[in-house]
Image (cartoon, grey):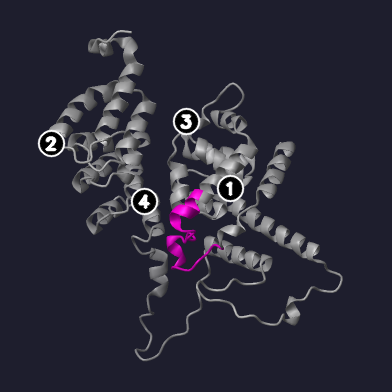
Amino acid sequence: MSDNFRDLERPDGVRRKDAVLMAAISGLECLDHPSRQDLARFSRLFMPLYREAGLDTRRTASATLSRLSRVPEDVAEMLINEPIAIAAPFIVHYPLLNENALTRAVMRHGAPHARAAARRSDLSPKAIAKLQELKDPSVDGLLVLRGLIPDPASLAVREPESGSAPNTRPTVDAPPLDPSEKLRAQLKAMVAAASPTPKSPLNRPTSPRKPLASDALAPGRTKQDAAVTSAAARRRVGDVRLAQLARHAVTDQESWFATSLADAMGASYALAERIMMDLSGRQLATALIGLGAPESTIKSALESFFPHLAKPSVKHTLATDLIEELDSDSCAARLQAWQRADSYTNGAAAHVPALADGKPVRQDSDRRISPRDVRHRVSTSRKAG
């Protein structure tokens, strides 16, 4: 094996250049407090290697650098001006991103970069105003969903009537719920029917009481019948959530789909967002198969959010090939592992979407779809297909 560094200049050394690029990133990652000289050396090494790297390596490099505490400014500005498939993780997660450089990139590349910028956790009012200047419905919807700007519809409802008396409060009918709020109300009603005994608040011991007459089983009903009824109610809740996923599995509905995915998994929005950030689409396919979603929903989501999976293949499309590669039992086990890790990380906190006005819209994690229901639903859908 040659030890000549100039071998990297040869055309057949693409993979070796990719390896050197990732090694350089690992070297920078090992430095707790890189000096200016370290950053300058990294920049001189990174730029030519990055230009010769493949698409997958560029995506990996962008995602890895987004987690570092400090990156050279010229490298950061180059990454945020890359195509959105590469730039998205860096725009969303890099903590020291220059706001002026980000604004220039958004104005140059438009809505795709703006949607990624709207996901940042440290947006200033100036940056939010710049994003609103684009007048893009998907960007504004994402800002509303995250609670960064008020919902125009709710503001219009709350405006007082101009002709009302100053000391009298006019009677105004409540506005109709939007479809998402109606769906949440249905979910809460179904879960309440599935668990008639409410849990006690945290840190408050429940006092023993005599069983009420309503707690007793109806004549002719057994505990097994009650368990079957509860399982059926949980399945209905799962079906409603899967229907919500199918409704939002279309282009330009990424944020609503991620919220629906978090609801279906009984996990935080951060977990759903990380799954959606996997540009290969494999994690999203794993999660949807683990939830027992129909193959049509999985295929629609993959082809809508990852356009490269809509390309034709030997059988049908790359999305169908990916679905056939994955095993339903393995996907269910992987999904349960993600849910456990998410509950440990987030303290089992329920995910509340920004438009819910701080009210919990999901029950505890023990309301998740059971693996038995998942396997039954997957086997049924595959037999039907």
Query: The residue tagged with tag 3: helix, strand or loop?
Result: helix
As helix, strand or loop, the secondary structure at mark 1 comes to helix
Q: Residue at x 56, y 39 (%)?
A: 286
The span from disc 2 to disc 4 (Cα, nearest Å) is: 36 Å
Q: Quadrant of residue 85?
A: top left
- Principal secondary structure, stretch drawn in magenta: loop
Looking at the image, which residue is at 40% across and 55% down? 141
Q: Earlier in the sequence, mark 3 or mark 2?
A: 2
Crowd tier of the residue under label 2, counting other residues whose Cα lies within 10 Å: few below 14, some 14–19, many 20 or above? few
Mark 2 or mark 4: whose residue is earlier in sequence? 2
* Front-most of residues 144 and 19: 19
Q: CA distance from mark 3 to mark 2?
A: 39 Å
Left of 298 or right of it: where is 253? left
Apparent side of residue 328 relative to residue 12 in the rendered image (left or right): right
How far, Cα to Cα, is label 4 from label 1?
22 Å
Lower position in the chain sequence, tag 2 or tag 1: 2
Label 3 with label 1: CB-CB less than 8 Å: no
State if disc 2 and disc 3 touch (CB < 8 Å).
no
Identify which amino acid the numbered label 1 is placed on: Ala
CB under 8 Å between discs 2 and 1:
no
**Magenta region, residue range:** 341-363
Residue at the disc numbered 1: 246
State if disc 4 and disc 2 touch (CB < 8 Å): no
Indicate which disc, 3 or 1, sits on the residue closer to the N terminus: 1
Disc number for residue 139: 4
Residue at image mark 3: 308
The answer, for residue 254, to whether it is visible in the render is no
Mark 4 or mark 1: which comes first in sequence?
4
The earlier-in-sequence mark between 3 and 4 is 4
| Closer mark to the observer between disc 2 and disc 4 | 2
Name the outermost residue toward the right: 220
Image quadrant holding the N terminus, namely top left
